[in-house]
Amino acid sequence: MGCICGRQSVVIQGQKFHLIRQIGEGSFSYVFEARDTADNHLYAIKKMSCHTNEEEKRAKDEIENYQRFSHPNLVSLLYHEQMQYNPTSHVTSIVWLVFPYFKANYDFL
């Protein structure tokens, strides 16, 4: 992941994204609103920091589950990539998942 003019960027399967802001957080992941630098579209990108082989397996299982199911009421996984880290680091790898970005609409409340 690089940093350009104070903005973080990441390349996932050849697509370059600028991370705009964090929009969610889980036990070992963060979700960001991101913009594709080529087409200027918004995406939701999940960054999963894996510290163990077990966490890497959970990330791979999540990817397989997204790929296994296709339904209009389920969000689609567009791209994914696993990036290995330095073996001396406490993080073994970072797994990136790219999804369509849907703006929240609370008009129905």
Image: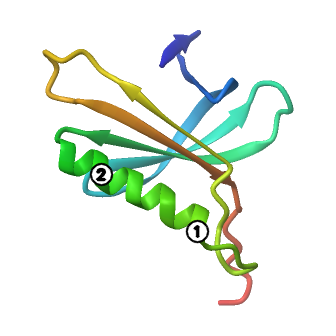
Q: Which residue is mark 2?
A: 57
Q: Are marks 1 and 2 in contact (CB under 8 Å)?
A: no
Residue 7 in percent (x, y) is at: 56, 20
Q: Residue at x 26, y 40 (%)?
A: 50
Which SS class for mark 2? helix
Q: Quadrant of the C terminus?
A: bottom right
Q: Farthest residue in the top direction?
A: 5
- Residue at mark 1 to residue at mark 2: CA–CA distance: 16 Å
Q: Earlier in the sequence, mark 1 or mark 2?
A: 2
Q: Residue at x 86, y 32 (%)?
A: 39
Query: In the displayed structure, does residue 101 sit left or right of residue 60?
Result: right
Which SS class for mark 1? helix
Amino acid type, callout 1: Arg
Q: Which residue is mark 1?
A: 68
Query: In the displayed structure, does residue 24 sit left or right of residue 91?
Result: right
Q: Depth check: give the residue in front, 45 or 21.
A: 45
Residue 60 in percent (x, y) is at: 40, 51
Q: Residue at x 30, y 39 (%)?
A: 49
Query: In the displayed structure, does residue 100 sit left or right of residue 19?
Result: right
Residue 10 in percent (x, y) is at: 56, 24
**Image coloring type:** rainbow
**The disc label shown at residue 19, or none:** none
Q: Residue at x 24, y 49 (%)?
A: 55
